[in-house]
Amino acid sequence: MNKSKSTLLHREALDGWLYASPWIIGFFLFTLGPIVASFVLAFMKWDLVNPPRWIGLDNYLRMFNDSVFWSSLKVTAIYSCFGVPLNLFGSLILALLCNQKLRGIEIFRTIYYLPSVVSGVAIGLLWKWLFDPTFGLINYLLSLVGIEGPMWLASETWALPALIVMGLWGVGGGMVIFLAGLQGIPLELYEAAELDGANRWNKFWQITIPMLSPVIFFNLIMGIISSFQTFTYAYVMTGGGPNNATLFYVLNLYYNAFLYLRMGYASALAWFLFLVILALTGLVFKSSPMWVYYESEVKGR
Amino acid sequence: MDDTFAKTHFLTAAQRNTLNKLIGYIVLTVLGIAFFLPFAWMLSTALKAEGYVFAFPPQWIPNPVQWSNFVECMRVVPFGHYLLNTALITGISLVGMLVSSTLVAYSFAKLRWPGRDIMFVILLSTMMLPGQVTMIPIYIMFNRMGWVDTWLPLTVPAFFGSPFFIFLLRQFFMSIPTELMEAAKIDGCSNFRIYSNIMVPLAKPAIATVAILHFLWTWNDFMSPLLYINSPEKYTVSLGLQAFQTQYTTNYRLMMAASLIALAPCLLLFFFGQKYFVQGVIMTGIKG
């Protein structure tokens, strides 16, 4: 009995490793190996044609003296500073609206959610057409209310705001997560608050927001990570222009790696991006005890 | 605000309720129109005849309706060919992703093996790593292997699973009671039989979620085809659409027709599988 049990356990351990092996092998091939390679590459100069040359910290030094690098960082930071909070706010408002008990509410949820599901080049082209300065829908609608719309993607000032506006079309993704959070708030909390004479405003700030704070936290982290990796829309719609006004960080990285074939420099760019994302998400994590409220904290008391 | 308004106007509770509902519907409808407008504009443009695209003020309902745009866009650019390529790549990648991710997730959720917990922590931490860090060495590796300008870089990595999907499926497998497994074991079932005959059938909803998400991401993926595919005959839909732009800069009519065709599978999937989408978002968003 004992012996068969131990062979069974042995068998299980063997199977466990075997079944997990696709990911474990993949981890070494596509994650750990490339991480090490990228780290080393960042200290080299290599155009894929001539042999790589060790140049120490030059790539990093060059990066900090490169005005294009700083402008791409600025573009990405501005995009995130406006885009992430606007998206967070917009998806929360939509979720609150969609949480009403109205007949046919599912239809509205579907309409709001749909744009966040479709992505890619087709959507980029659609928005390029919507933003067309003379024949596009957006400037037509603006003209109806007497506003002469800007040149949008062709304007240095308006290209980045245009991409932020476009990002708002995708707030449905965050909305669905918020909705799930809203539906998880026990109704007794609201009933108890009503007995204590709380009005709508009080209930929103004292119950809804604290109970949703873990979801806000999650959406904030995901928002920061994805906005710092913006690539496809900028590539398809503006190519980084006009005059680098929408040259996002990753777009600059892509051009350096695959257009100018600066493999070492682009690797250094990738590592710096990683550090920026790590620092920002770390900051949010650090601040979370101050504003994120977990139910279990109360239960523990 | 509503309360005071209602009180000063002496509305009954029922009237107040109706008023609130009405305001709710108005706000929802206005927003709904705003969200749907881009799609309507896309469809409208795709159905317009040559000279009507730049008409001012724009026509919402095209007259005449030109269905032939959908055929023409396929002729101008070999778009049907790109669709077929994308379907093939997506299909192969999907099979690889489903087989590997479920198997790995099962191992993490239900089997005990030394090092499992450490490996799981590593798996979670790899999800934090931005893809740009590994992108360049992986490109160089595939380049060395002679895989550039083949479909291999777009399909083979899927056979090694994805941390995100493994995590999602593992969470689902964890919720399946272990008793089921124990009973099957006593009957002499092998671990693989338990996986294939018990776990996979029970995890169908989670697998559907993974399948839908992976389908969408692969179908719409732009970065990988852009990096790896050079020959036009190997293009995916994303690259094909991009080709429309450079050759026919102002031909929005055909561009929108092609874009709609490219989006059609995603839209269909969305309408038929909406509950799996929401489930996936919630599974990863809230419990993660």
Image (cartoon, helix red, strand yellow):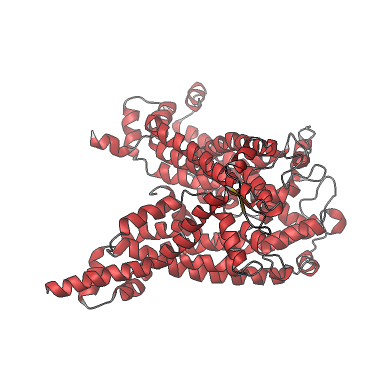
Looking at the image, residue A166 sits to the left or right of residue A171; the answer is right
* Residue at x 82%, y 58% (from the top left corner): B248
Q: Quadrant of the C terminus of chain A?
A: top left
Looking at the image, residue B63 sits to the left or right of residue B178; the answer is right
* Residue at x 63%, y 43% (from the top left corner): A249
* Residue at x 45%, y 34% (from the top left corner): A283
Where residue A164 sits: x, y (%)?
Answer: 64, 39
Looking at the image, residue A67 lies above or below residue B174: above
Q: Quadrant of the N terminus of chain A?
A: bottom left
Where residue A58 sits: x, y (%)?
Answer: 61, 41
Of residues B231 and B285, the one nearer the viewer is: B231
How many callouts does the rendering have?
0
Looking at the image, residue B152 sits to the left or right of residue A214; the answer is right
Residue that lies at the very extreme toward the bottom in this rendered image: B188
Where residue B227 sits: x, y (%)?
Answer: 65, 59
Looking at the image, residue B84 lies above or below residue A219: below
Looking at the image, residue A245 lies above or below residue B251: above
Tell me if I can see residue B30 in this picture: yes
Of residues A141 and B20, the one nearer the viewer is: A141
